Image (cartoon, rainbow, N blue to C red):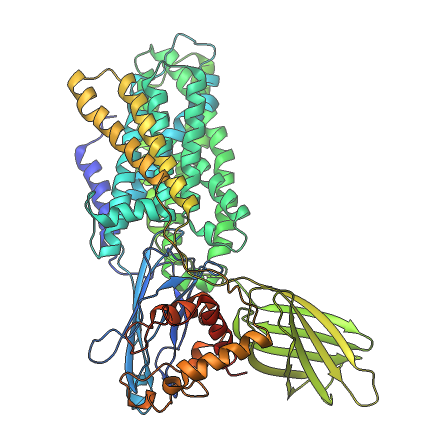
Amino acid sequence: MKIKHRKIWLVFIVIFYSAWAVTSVSAHALLLRSNPQANAVLEKPPVQVELFFSESLEPQLSSISVIDTNNVIVDVGDVRVDPSDTTRMTVSLRSLSDGVYTVTWKAVSATDGHQTVGTFPFAVGDVNAKAVSIIQQTSTASLPFSALLAKFLLLAALAILVGQRLFIALVWNPALKSNQDVSEPVVWMKLYRIGLIGILLAIGIGILSQAGQTTGNELSFPWDPETGRVLIETRLGLIWLVRLVLVLAVFWFVASKPADWKNWLGFVANVALLFTITLTSHSATEIKPLLPMLADLVHLIGMSFWLGGLVYLFTGILHLQQLDAQLRTKLTSLVTSRFSVNAIIFVALIGLTGFYSASLRVGTWSALLDTIYGHVLLVKQIFVAGLLVIAAINFSIISPRLSRERAQGTDNAVLITHFGRILIVEITLAVLLLASVSFLTYLPPAKIVVPDTDFTSAKQVDDIKIEIYIAPAHIGENEFMLMLVSNGQPVDSAKQVLLRFTPSQANIPPSELQLLADGGGMYSAKGTYLSLPGKWQVQAVVRRENKFDAFANFDLTLQAPGSANKTSAAFIWTGSLILTIGLLLALITFTLKVNRLLQLGLGISLVVLMISLGVVNMTRPTPVENVQANPIPANQESVKAGEILYITNCAACHGVSGKGDGPVGLTLNPRPADLTQHAVPGVHTDAQLFEWITNGFPGSRMPAFKSRLSDTDRWNLVNFIRTLAPQ
C-alpha cells in the first residue's frame, strides 16, 4: 500500500496546470448597464457616469476614471458606491466639450473579492457617430493562480479538520466500541495540525492575493499599504480576520490541555470557518440568500465528511494493520461498513443541495452546455461520478466480502490491500474534485439574477383597474406608466390621466405629471418628480367622459443615495477582531512549549503588535463625511431667496436658465456647468451641491462662496438650483 512518488506528482501537476491554464475570465461583478451607454453619441454632455453591476461593490477598491482623447482626466474624482444600492457606482464630470471620451472602471465584488476591469467610449456633440460605434468596449479579469491556491488550501484543510471529528463520532468510535484498547492513530493529530497550518497558509495567501489584484500584481507584500486597506477597510478583510480568529482559537484548543469539550468547540469553530466560505460564495449574492447559504453550508459539511473521511478511513485502516490478521479483518469490516452507511447519507445531502444550487446558478440545459460555469460543473460531476462508482464498489462488493470474512472469523490480507489501493484512487479523485470546486467559485454563474428595484402595484376603483409601474423607482428621473382596464377591456379614451406626487416629509407642495396615451390602455411619461428620500404618496387620477373621476393612491418608499465612506462601527469591528487575535496569540504563546527565545522574541512581539493595532483601530476617528441633510425646507420662501442670490452671484456665468450660457460664462474655458442637468434629483445630493458652492467645483473657474455667503444662503441657493431641473 505504498504510494509511489510519481503518482503524487502527477496529481499535483494536473491540479496546478488546470488552474494555471485559464488566464482570463469574466469575474463576478459584471457590468450590466451604464449611463451614458457604451458607444453613445450625446447631444448634451453628461454630468456624471453611472455604472450598474451584477453584485455589490467594495467601495474602497472600486473606481471609475474618464479621460478625453488627449489622455486628460475629465472626472471630478468623487467616485462613490451608493449605500442604498451597492451595485451602483458613479463619478461626477467636469464640463465636457464636443469629443470622444473613454470610461475606465475597476469593480471589486464585496461578496467574493473578484476584480473586473473594463473600458467603453462615449461621445458628445458633433463627432463621427459611425467611428464611435465601432470602438469596442472591454470587460476582463485575470484569474490569479494564488487566489485559486488559497481557496483550494482552505477547502482541503477544512475537509481534514471537520472530517476528523465527524469520522471519529460517526464511524471510528461506534465501530470500535467493543475494542476500547485500540487507540486512535497518532497520525490523525498530525493531520489535524497540518490542516490548521493549511488554513493559515490559505489566509496569508488569500489576503496577499486580494491586495495584489487591486494593484495588478499576483501577490502584494505584507507591508504594502494596499494589504492594510484590504484588511481594515473592506468587508472581505473583516472575513479574513474572522477566519484568523477562528483558526487561532482552534490552535489554542489543540495546544492546551486536552479535553472533550475543547474538541467539540474546535469542531464548532471549524464549521464556522466553513460558513465564512458561504459568505463569499455565489449563494451570498442571491436576492434572498438565507436558504441558498444554508444549502451551501450543508453541502460543504457533507463534502468534508466524505472527502476528509476518506483520508481518515485510509489512515485508520493502515493503523489497524498492526493488529493480528483476524482482528484486523473484523475491525476493517466494521469501520468500512459504518463509513459506507454514513457516506450514503452525506452523499444524498450533497446531491440534493448541489442540485438546488445548480438550479439557481445554471437554470437551463443550454446554460449548462454553453457556458464556462456549466462546463466546469460538468467536469466536477465527472469526478463525483467516479467517486460514486468507487463508493458503490466498496458498498456492494468490498464491504460484504469483509463482512463474510468477519463472520467466518478469517482474514483476507489480499482483499484489504486491494481496498487500500482503491482508497488511494478515491482520495486522488477527491483532490481533483476540490480543485474543480475551487475553480468553480471564481467563475460567474451561468444564470445571473438582477435585483428588481422597479415599483409595481394595482388597485381596483369602481369599474376600472389601475396598474402602476415606476422604473427604476429611485430618486431622480423615472419612467411612469399606468395600465387602465375596465371590464376586461383596455381604456384608450381617457380624457386625462395624471399622477400626483406628495412627499410625507418637508414642506413641499404636490406636483403633477400628465401621462400620454400609448395605446392598448397604456399611458406613460418620464420626469424627475421623485426628488427626496423617504415616503411618497403617488396618486393616479383618471378622468373619463360620462364617468366619475377615479382616484388610486400608491405608497412608495425611496432610499437615500449618498457616498459610502467607512463608519465608526466598521473601525470598531476591525479593531476588536485584531485585538482578539492579539489575545489568542498571547494564549498560544504561553501555552506552547517552545524555545524560550522564540517564545519571548517572536511571540511577545506579535502579541504587542496585534494588541496595539487593535486598540489603534478601535479608537480611530471616523472620517468626516459630507452627507448632511438640507436643513432648509424647499418652500416658496427659500426658493425665492435662492433665486435672488443666484441672479446676483451665478447668472453671469451659468445664465438665467442655468445652462452655462451666461455672458461671462461664454468667455470661459472650460465652460460653466449646465446646472439643468446637475440639478436633476438623484444625480447629486443636496450636500454635494452645497459642498461645490462652498469650496468651488474642481477643475473649473467657479470660485468658493464660503466666505461670501452664509450657510443659510448657500442652502437656499441649493433649493433654487433644484428648480432649474427639467420637469
Front one among 486 and 20:
486
The one of 518 and 540 positioned closer to us in this rendering: 540
User: Considering only vertical position in the picture, is 201 above or below 362?
Assistant: above
**Where is residue 285 drawn, in percent x and y?**
46, 54
Q: Nearer the viewer, residue 86 or 251?
A: 86
Residue at far left of view: 597
Residue found at x 53% / y 63%? 631
Q: In which quarter of the image is residue 50?
A: bottom left
Quadrant of the rendering where the N terminus is positioned: top left
| 688 left or right of 5 in image | right
Horizontal side of 355 relative to 49 (left or right) equals: right
Q: Is residue 510 above or below residue 215?
A: below
The residue lying at 21 percent from left, 36 percent from top is 8
Q: In this view, does 85 lie to the left or right of 483?
A: left
Number of numbered tags placed on the structure image: 0
Q: In this view, does 452 lie above or below 193?
A: below
Q: Can you see residue 553? A: yes
Q: Residue at x 31, y 70 (%)?
A: 76
* Residue 507 point in image, percent of width and height: 62, 69
* Camera-nearest residue between 118 and 335: 118
Q: Position of residue 399 (x, y in %)?
A: 44, 26
Q: Residue furthest top?
A: 181
Q: Is residue 599 above or below residue 117?
A: above
Q: In which quarter of the image is residue 120?
A: bottom left
Image x and y of residue 137, in percent: 31, 74
- Tell me if residue 385 can be seen: no
Residue 107 location, quadrant: bottom left
| Quadrant position of the C terminus in the picture | bottom right
